[in-house]
Amino acid sequence: MDLEQFKSQIDIVEVIQSFIPLRKVGTNYQAPCPFHNEKSPSFVVSPSKQIFTCFGCGKSGDAITFLKEYKNLDFKDALAEIASMFNIPLPHKESKAHNQRKDIYQVYAKIQKSLQEDLLANQKLKGYVLKRLGSLEAIEKFGLGYFGQNSRKVINELDFKERELLKEVGFLNENNRCAFFERLSFALFNPAYKIIGFAGRTQPFFNFKNSPKYLNSKQSFVFNKSQFLYNFHLAQKAIKQSKQIIVCEGYMDSIALQILGKHNCVATCGTAFNTQHLAQIFKLELECQILFFFDNDNAGLEATKRALEVCFSQGYFNVGVIRILDKHKDAGEILQENLLQNTQTLLLKATDGFSFYLKLLFNEQISSAQKGRNLEILKALINAQKNPFLKQELSQKVATTLNINLKFHTPLLQENPNNTLEASFYKSVLENEYIEALSVEYLQGRELGIYEKSWREYIKSKTRDRIANELFIDESIRTFDIPSARKAMKGLIFNDARKQKEILLAKKDYLGLIALNNYLTQLTS
Ligand SMILES: [Zn+2]
């Protein structure tokens, strides 16, 4: 497989989406640019052209360029990472990534089987899980287990290759030791129901001394901790049906809410909600409301605020906040109470995320000076939104919540001012080789105005510079079919001729004028 074949098997949207939340706008995708600091999205990704371009800073290129720049990799490493993302071999030589991934799925599945057996064989722990979760079905459904004797044996009996693999993903350390022993375990599934890691939690029947309550699998080629959403595989269907996703903070919360009937509930694991999580949700390509459900305490409130800001920074305002209305700290406690009392009530209330955020920024505990600064941040945020209807909606919420009228200039929707004859024609040149040939035959370059230099570069070296890429990706700029391109080209030539005539007249260059007239007659015949 050569590089071109390799590129034909990858998708730039999928690559970029693994790192940045992209939103579909028309046929392209948009986001605030990751390469320069901005609030409104000028970073555009085109699935049909397989390129990205930033209209702000001018960075552009294909999927490989993106990864190189974004992660600061060299070309070879960028290729390797993409190959493993798409499970395809590297150009020119065989890659290990694909097989390694399949192998680790198998080893993890084998381990999970033994963990589940360990849990079911341990009466005390089984009772503990039953008490916390209400049934033993949860063990299978949520991939629970226990790192006990049986699992120890299974792991010890793995062959050399399997153990090397477990070392590579950090499941075993250099001395073949696993950090999870004696812990309750949670298998971590990817959206395709493959196990990509484990989490281990302390349990009451073993003295863990001072070790942390939770341990997670290490970052590896199969497990990206900062983008992982627990139970996403189970929740996908319910998210699509309800057009809502509940995001909570921990494994137990997510399981508790699922058991309480909130099947669209996922959890971040040991990392705060960030843009990579948002990217996972945007991959579903549906307008869904994100509901944050964090602990009923100050830390939970702070986490909620930060999560909302992550969404707002990406121009996403379809968010809400769920707060617990009674004394319970988290979803686990609610489930406990429900199991004890055998009730089905959930005392939860969802409020609009932006209004909730406003109340956080401007409550009575905030000093006037801080409120003033918050107001400036808020204004900048609203002003950065390109959609005039959204701007209006947000200003409205500010007005009702804070009793302050923010006035924003909302321009009428208008056609792209860049949609000129020159732009459309040059874009057609970029897209169509025949039109390119026409342009080479008939144009001098001057006719293309601001695109002259870019056009010269393109016909000479076949590479698109920044200006060309911006045109190429801009869906609001029309292109011509061949007959219309001919007409457009004539238009360009005549426009230019009119300008030239004036110049020649001013210079009294009559020979030049005759030559120009001859040229035009020739052209029209
Ligand atoms: Zn940029």
Image (cartoon, helix red, strand yellow):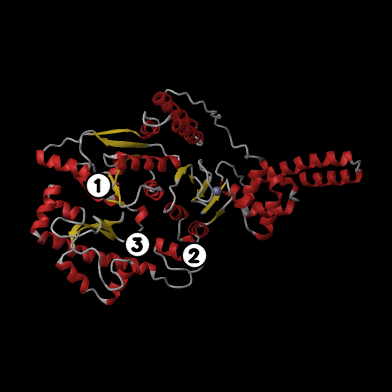
Within 10 Å of disc 3 (Cα), the crowding (few <14, some 14-19, many 20+) is many
Pointer 3 or 2: first along the chain: 2
In the displayed structure, 287 sits above or below 67; it is above
Is label 3 in a helix, a strand or a loop?
Answer: loop
Which label number is shown at residue 160?
A: none
From mark 1 to mark 3, how far is it between C-alphas? 22 Å
Quadrant in the rendering for residue 100: bottom left
Q: Amino acid at mark 3?
A: Val
Say which residue appears at 14% left-offset and 39% top-offset.
338
Within 10 Å of disc 2 (Cα), the crowding (few <14, some 14-19, many 20+) is few
Residue of label 1 = 254
Q: Given the current orientation, which residue lies at the most extreme left position?
A: 123
The number of numbered badges drawn on the structure is: 3
Residue of label 3 = 222
Of circles 3 and 2, the one toward us is 3
Is label 1 in a helix, a strand or a loop?
Answer: helix
From mark 3 to mark 2, how far is it between C-alphas? 25 Å
Say which residue appears at 79% left-offset and 42% top-offset.
497
Label 1 with label 3: CB-CB less than 8 Å: no
Label 1 with label 2: CB-CB less than 8 Å: no
Quadrant in the rendering for residue 308: top left
Ligand 1 within 8 Å, label 3 CB: no
* Residue 284 falls left or right of residue 144: right
Q: Amino acid at mark 1?
A: Ser
Residue of label 2 = 5
